[in-house]
Amino acid sequence: MTYSDQREPTNEDLWAQPPANTPSTYPGQSLAPVTPPAPSPVPRHPRDHSTGPTPDKASFVIAIISLGVAIPLTAIAAGVSGLPGLLIVWAGLVMVNFVFGWTRRPH
């Protein structure tokens, strides 16, 4: 093993911060002056967020779930009891969607 005068730098050497008042030895390493942010202008009229219709995600979700349930129920009802079972299943699905839409309507 050979001995050398060089040593690995420690974390304190690598991450040591110079005092704020000392000029930097490297160009571009000085601290940038801190400027306070400009005050934002206050709007004269507050925005009214209720002017446009808001998308109702619950209606979309109930529609997707109804379609997902309708496919297997249609197959089961048509296979077991034919047309009467098919009509009962679809009447039930229509009623569920109708009641959901009726309760969600604006008053």
Image (spheres, helix red, strand yellow):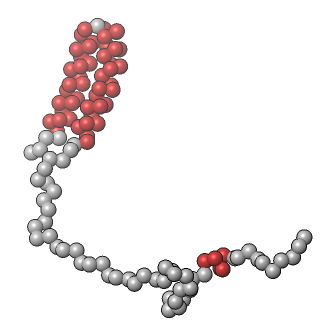
- Image height of 38 relative to 1, above or below: below
- Image height of 44 relative to 69, above or below: below
The C terminus appears in which quarter of the rendering? top left
Q: Position of residue 51 (x, y in %)?
A: 11, 53
The N terminus appears in which quarter of the rendering? bottom right
Q: Position of residue 61 (x, y in %)?
A: 29, 36
Q: Nearer the viewer, residue 44 or 60?
A: 44
Residue furthest to the bottom? 21
Residue furthest to the right? 1
Residue at point 27%, 34% (across, down): 62
Left or right placement of residue 4 versus residue 71 in this view:
right
Q: Nearer the viewer, residue 4 or 27?
A: 27
**Could you say which quadrant of the image residue 6 lies in?**
bottom right
Residue at point 29%, 7% (across, down): 82
Q: Nearer the viewer, residue 105 or 33?
A: 33
Left or right placement of residue 94 versus residue 31 in this view:
left
Q: Position of residue 20 (x, y in %)?
A: 50, 88
